[in-house]
Image (cartoon, helix red, strand yellow):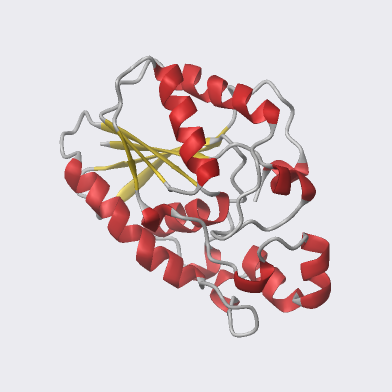
Amino acid sequence: MKLYFIRHGKTQWNLEGRFQGAGGDSPLLPESYQQMVQVGRYLRGITFTHAYASPIKRARVTAQHVIRELHQKVPLTLMSRLEEFHLGRMEGQTFTSIQERFPAELDAFRNHPDRYTTTAIGGETFQQVIDRMTPAIQTIVANNPRPQDNVLIVGHGAALNAEINALLATPLADLRKRGGIRNTSVTVLETSDGQHFDLLDWNNTSFLTAAATPTDTI
């Protein structure tokens, strides 16, 4: 079966360079809705058995709009285990402010996941996020057991990046080495047993007409 991971549409805080985390949820930008249409049209030729999304509004709304463009009756299930990182005191803060207040934590979050600790800021480590997300992915695979099944999973940039790489058996220290995930991008994994995964496509944005900007990717 194949899992099509989509990051939610770009939000106001994404544009402003702020960490949203699981506790923040700024509005989706007007142009994000057009990009959701483009994702849906790109995937329209694929038959999906089910869609899953984080219940946080920016992911839930993205999932609903993408499904609408598929022109298929695809059931949507919300799963709290697909939420973004809980980022403690970094949530809602600009990257510039965090660089001043928590430089070690910011560097580790971006570049050295194995060194990222939450003692000073609260929230979740990379391993904690992976430990809560992996059972959700295993449940999704178990509920869609046929080889021809395709599922959509709509979530958040940092959490999806960590989990997808973990599913690919990437060491914790190397989770960020494939780079970031852009808003409304598509990443595809394939599995036959829910334990071993192959990467078919990473951070695909070929269908988006808007040029990429630095604030699109985390």
Tell me the residue at 64%/37% (across/down). 28
Tell me the residue at 20%/39% (across/down). 144
- Viewer-nearest residue: 153 or 74: 74
Tell me the residue at 70%/60% (across/down). 92
- Residue 44 sits in quarter: top left
Q: Residue 206 in the image: state x and y as whole percent.
A: 59, 25
Q: Is residue 60 left or right of residue 26?
A: left
Q: Is residue 166 visible?
A: yes
- Residue 71 sits in quarter: top left
Q: Is residue 196 visible?
A: no
Q: Is residue 207 left or right of residue 106?
A: left
Viewport quadrant of the N terminus: top left
Q: Residue 8 in the image: state x and y as whole percent.
A: 55, 40
Is the residue 105 above or below the residue 82 in the image?
below
Tell me the residue at 18%/47% (across/down). 142
Q: Residue 70 in the image: state x and y as whole percent.
A: 40, 18
Is the residue 121 above or below the residue 152 in the image?
below
Is the residue 14 above or below the residue 71 in the image?
below
Q: Quick one: which residue is furthest to the left in this view? A: 146
Image mark count? 0
Is the residue 218 above or below the residue 148 in the image?
below
Q: Residue 19 in the image: state x and y as whole percent.
A: 68, 58
- Viewer-nearest residue: 36 or 110: 36
